Amino acid sequence: DSGVTQTPKHLITATGQRVTLRCSPRSGDLSVYWYQQSLDQGLQFLIQYYNGEERAKGNILERFSAQQFPDLHSELNLSSLELGDSALYFCASSLQPNTGELFFGEGSRLTVL
Amino acid sequence: DQQVKQNSPSLSVQEGRISILNCDYTNSMFDYFLWYKKYPAEGPTFLISISSIKDKNEDGRFTVFLNKSAKHLSLHIVPSQPGDSAVYFCAASANNDMRFGAGTRLTVKP
């Protein structure tokens, strides 16, 4: 158990819909990262937050947005969903940004039909 | 942009032998490199790391080698065990983000 909690574990929705994925980092970790893993693909970095502020942005689509709240949990919002958005979405946390080791949640599997 | 590449999608080795997983990167600003291991239905877990100021780091059966001039790193597992069967991700970090390779699926046969 990494200490990072992601909900929901599984989500099935239709094209055009909007979903929110939630992440609670490890206790004390200030930095949260979001990654997308499509079928047989590597982990694509989406976005990183540190103590409520956006720190780095990767290959995140404009239809996607995220935020980190004062209690340090984070949400990833995916809108106007397309079939290609079906993937595993991982959240990870670390105490400081760029410390190297990330602790990953078990992921949220999104299926868009 | 694929800044971190793992060109072998899969590797199969016999139990007790050495497993060598390779990773190449393009961004010379990367200063920290890591390997993560992922079992099905679980998130990746940290395995071993190396700073860019070193060329080798060893932890039990796992050793990571870094060749900065070639922008190449490798993970050696000796001896390989069936429980090592998993997907291994190479990662590199610089500034505020960490980039991952596509992963190599290691199968260790008894």
Image (tube, rainbow, N blue to C red):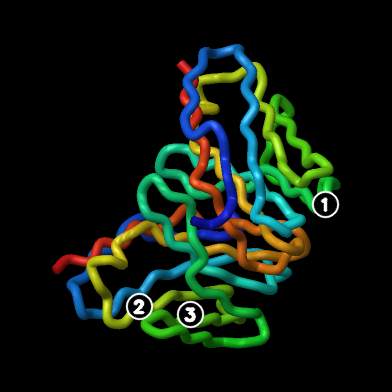
Q: Chain of mark 1?
A: A
Q: Residue at x 54, y 13 (%)?
A: A15
Q: What amino acid does circle 1 point to?
A: Asn
Residue density around tag 3, few if under 14, some if 14–19, many if 20 or more, within 10 Å: many
Is A13 in front, or is A25? A25
| Rendering quarter of residue B105 | bottom left
Mark 3 residue element: strand
Q: Which residue is mark 1?
A: A51
Q: What amino acid does circle 2 point to?
A: Ile
Label 2 to label 1: alpha-carbon separation: 37 Å
Is A106 in front, or is A45? A106
Instruction: Give the vertical position of A34 relative to A27 (above or below).
Output: above
Residue B17 picture location, percent across and down: 22, 79
B99 horizontally vs B12: left or right: right
Instruction: Give the vertical position of A12 relative to B1 (above or below).
Output: above
Q: Which residue is mark 2?
A: B77
Residue B1 picture location, percent across and down: 62, 49
Q: Which residue is mark 3?
A: B64
Q: What amino acid does circle 3 point to?
A: Val
Residue density around tag 1, few if under 14, some if 14–19, many if 20 or more, within 10 Å: some
Label 1 to label 3: alpha-carbon separation: 32 Å
Q: Residue at x 56, y 60 (%)?
A: B4
Residue A54 picture location, percent across and down: 82, 46
B43 horizontally vs B108: left or right: right
Mark 2 residue element: strand
